Amino acid sequence: MAKDRLASVLERWEAVIGLEIHTELTTLNTKMFCGCPVAFGGEPNTRVCPVCLGMPGALPVPNQAAIEATVLAGLATNCEIAEWSQFHRKNYFYPDMPKNYQISQYDLPFCVDGFVEIDIEPEGAPQRPDRDGAYTTHIGITRIHLEEDTGKMIHVGGSEGRISGATHSLVDFNRAGTGLIELVSEPDIRTPEEARRFAQKLRLIWLTLGISDCNMEEGSMRVDANVSVRPRGESEFGTKAEVKNMNSFKALHDALAYEIVRQAEELESGGRVVQETRHWDAGAKRTSSLRSKEEAHDYRYFPEPDMVPFEFTAEWIESVRATLSELPDEKKKRLIATYGIPVHDATVLTGEDLDMAEFFEAAVTISGPERAKAVSNVMLNDLSMHLNAAGIGVAESKVVPSMVAELVALVDEGTISSKQAKEVFAEMAETGDAPGAIVELRGMKQVSDTGAIEEIVDRVLVANPGQVEQYRGGKTGIIGYFVGQVMREMGGQANPKVVNEVLARKLAE
């Protein structure tokens, strides 16, 4: 989807987007209502029992750790925690749900009325700069409820994830019954980029809490989107379509961009948008119709008869709150206050990879807080470029905090120039060698001895009397010529700062 095509549509139409984000509680030892182990993969249908297979007479026993993880997620996203709630049966016939119903929550979820603030450039939905000057958008959270996951369908002979064209289908129930939290956002999202930032922010929060590995490729975190469009200036919602099968943040962005343009162009041509569920085909980069959209009454919810309601005391809720880790927004504010780095630096360090902020603090502990900005510069430029090019996370890189701290010190002390530092970084990223060892091996140490530099400067000035007269006649920009001559004479190893100081003094005499 061309970016300018989407931008053109959004000038005339406003998108209204709500997300449903399903996250498996992969850090649990057992499934939601039985003792079967939780793990990705394995031989099909080997992690099952009468409870998760829905055998007659098998009774569910709720997983306490899953309930605590759900409440923790609600507290981390500013939700109100219900003091009284219960599970419901969501009845439907899908072949990947062996009981023909799913134990979920309907009108009494554990967590309601929360919100998350996302950092985003001032475009799309109304935003406001916070007191640090960054722009944020408020995304409301309707609810977070706990349920059991379904099994996995494998369609043989057709395109991946599609029944159409398949000769037959297989079902693996290993995943069925795994604890799953579903977060439903308010329809506060206005652009595909906001949707992507919101989902990324939630992933970072869940990882910080340690409740899931959030692996989208393996299905631990899955995102569905409800999207509609309306003419700019209108307040009434348009007809929405639900989009499924978005297994990456890029897929989420691209699917929403396509669907917004599709709906707008359909309406502009005199057609109408129908309420339905649509499938995102990443290969074809388009959505296609799957089925008409179900409503809540289609599922015939009723209270789960095999479990009593839950009552949470204020003391228990506070005991869960006490286990909250430092969240990304709190960490960002602390880095700014403690190390004096800019808002942008702190936002990047805390906004994508949990290990980046940890790496930064480890490097600053070694280098000293006075070099925090220099450490941040190396991480946001050289290190980020290296990670992106290699397609790895910081934890997988050969570069470790002590290397960055040493590299920053070598530049700060004048041992090497900032230009040489980039060469050193490239080599240490490839080999894992320490910066000092690379500088020593390659003979890159700068000459900062004033006496040695003065000798070369005198020689250069004597050899270039015409340029000296030009400088003294007011053409001061020619000093760059002299610097180049000195650096050439010294094989590029003279300290540029000292060279400039000596030249300025000699030319003024």
Image: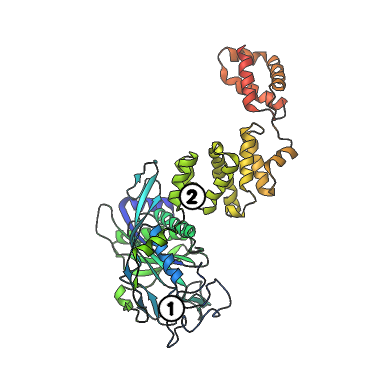
Residue nearer the viewer, 27 or 423 = 27
The crowd level at tag 1 (other Cα within 10 Å; few <14, some 14-19, many 20+) is: some
SS at circle 2:
helix
Q: Which residue is mark 2?
A: 350
Seen in the image, is 144 located left or right of residue 470? left
Residue 469, horizontal then vertical, whole percent: 62, 12
Is the residue 72 above or below the residue 381 in the image? Answer: below
User: Which one is in front, 308 or 370?
Assistant: 308
The residue at 56%/80% (across/down) is 46
Pointer 1 residue: 61
Q: Nearer the viewer, mark 1 or mark 2?
A: 1
Report x, y in % for residue 443. 74, 35
Amino acid under disc 2: Thr
419 left or right of 56 in image? right
Looking at the figure, which quarter contains the C terminus? top right
- Relative vertical location of residue 51 with respect to residue 446 in this rendering, above or below: below
Helix, strand or loop at label 1? It is loop
